Image (cartoon, grey):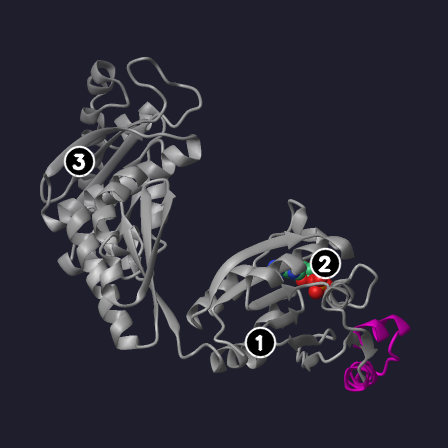
Amino acid sequence: MGPFERAEIIAAGSELLTPHRIDTNSLFLTARLNELGVVVGGKCVVGDRKADLALVFRQALERADVVIISGGLGPTADDVTRDAVAEVLERPLEEHADILDTIRERFARRGARMPEINRRQAMVPAGAVPLANAVGTAPGLMIETANRLIVLLPGPPRELRPMFEAFVAPRIARDAGGRMLRRRVVKVTGRSESQVEELSQPVYSTFGASGVEMDTTILAAPGQIELHVSAIGADPAQIDRALDDAVGRLEAAIGSPVFSTDGRALEAVVGDLLRTKGWRVAAAESCTGGGLLSRLTEVPGSSGWVIGGIVAYANDVKIDQLGVPADLIAGHGAVSEPVAQAMAEGVRRKLGADIGVGITGIAGPDGGSPEKPVGTVAIAVCGGTTRARTFLFPGDRDAIRRHATSAALEMMRQDLLGQNL
Ligand code: AMP
Ligand code: MG
């Protein structure tokens, strides 16, 4: 059989169609399949109805070499995966003696008798190979047809993951034709998704020349764009060369807004720069309410470069704690570059930092005006030099606050790099 190139994942479980539970198994399975060189061509979540599961399973079989179904292997009537799979494959359900013994023993070890309903778990499509479950009662099942690998795994992630590693990964690796997928992430800030896409397009168009199969996806979040570049091939050295080359050319095309190509978050990049320079930071935050310091202190070791800060929400705090002149606020408004700068200078002085940051803005939904609409944020950084900027961020309150902390981190990064343009 094989090579296995394309997989589909079906997450079975009505609870996954409520707002209370999310399908995380497919994320784990996708990551592992990709590492094994298998592309996930589709996935879906389906409720505990045999006819629905049978329909999506039938479709998946038409498109993929590997179909993985998670969930619905328990003993109760809503666990319909075995039945649906048997029906679609036109294989009878047969009682599997070994599975029955294993489940009986599991109960016996705890001094209990196996409830009769657990017998269902030993009824499996003919020819299915059981996968031992070290953690729970539901065994997994693997079925090989002439040209398909079908894997049924229990829903609980702590049962599914070890079972995938022990039985499924080795089986796929054997027929993956020695192919593997590797991925790099290029992180960009201060540019929109379409700007990044436009700058990257000429680089994408050269990917065909690399000799390995390459692909990119673009992920946008407030204040950050990620380019995920993946390469599939048989020769790891060739894959790494192609990825190094692609990342190098993307960095050159996009320029200084690229802040990381090694997975580090913006706050970690800034932390590393502070550590290298031996500088310590203090922040005065109004509309972000401590969000910048929260991100800076997510980084392990940040006590080495973060002093602290003042959440200066009310004007009184800006004036009394940070020494912002009252007439500056009266003259320019609390959301203004002069006030942001006075906040940055004030907190640097008060806490004895090397670099000070001031953030003041209107996160909304109320408080906007025609001159200063919701999303207006003034940010100042005083480090190597002093610089203040006014931004107009899009989105709701959460997005604006997130944008503001990213912009402040980016202004810090530029100051620390001496790129204060
Ligand atoms: P089941 O194997 O269908 O009996 O699933 C048992 C439990 O596993 C469910 O109640 C969920 O809490 C969890 N579960 C099932 N499917 C998933 C999934 N796709 N992702 C994460 N957890 C799941
Ligand atoms: Mg279920």
Along the polypeptide, which appears first: circle 1 or circle 2? 2
Q: Earlier in the sequence, mark 1 or mark 3?
A: 1
Q: Residues within 10 Å of mark 3 (few under 14, many from 20)?
A: many
Range drawn in magenta: 97-122
Q: Earlier in the sequence, mark 2 or mark 3?
A: 2
Q: Give the position of the C terminus as an image quadrant.
A: top left
Provide the secondary structure element on which disc 2 rests.
helix
Badge 3 residue CB within 8 Å of ligand 1: no
* Membership of 105 in magenta stretch: yes
Q: Is residue 184 above or below residue 413?
A: below
Quadrant of picture, ligand 2:
bottom right
Q: Which residue is mark 1?
A: 162
Name the one closer to the observer, 56 or 388: 56
Instruction: Identify which amino acid the numbered label 1 is placed on.
Output: Pro
Reading the image, the residue beneath label 2 is 54
Residue 11: image quadrant is: bottom right
Query: Separation of disc 1 and disc 2 at Cα?
Result: 26 Å
Q: Nearer the viewer, mark 2 or mark 3?
A: 2
| Secondary structure category for the residue under label 1 | helix
Left or right of 33: which side holds 53?
right
Amino acid tagged 2:
Ala
Query: Residue 382: image x %, image y %?
Result: 15, 39
Give the percent coordinates (x, y) of residue 52. Answer: 73, 53
Identify the residue under disc 3. Answer: 345
293 part of magenta stretch:
no
> Which residue is located at x 72 percent, y 68 percent?
89
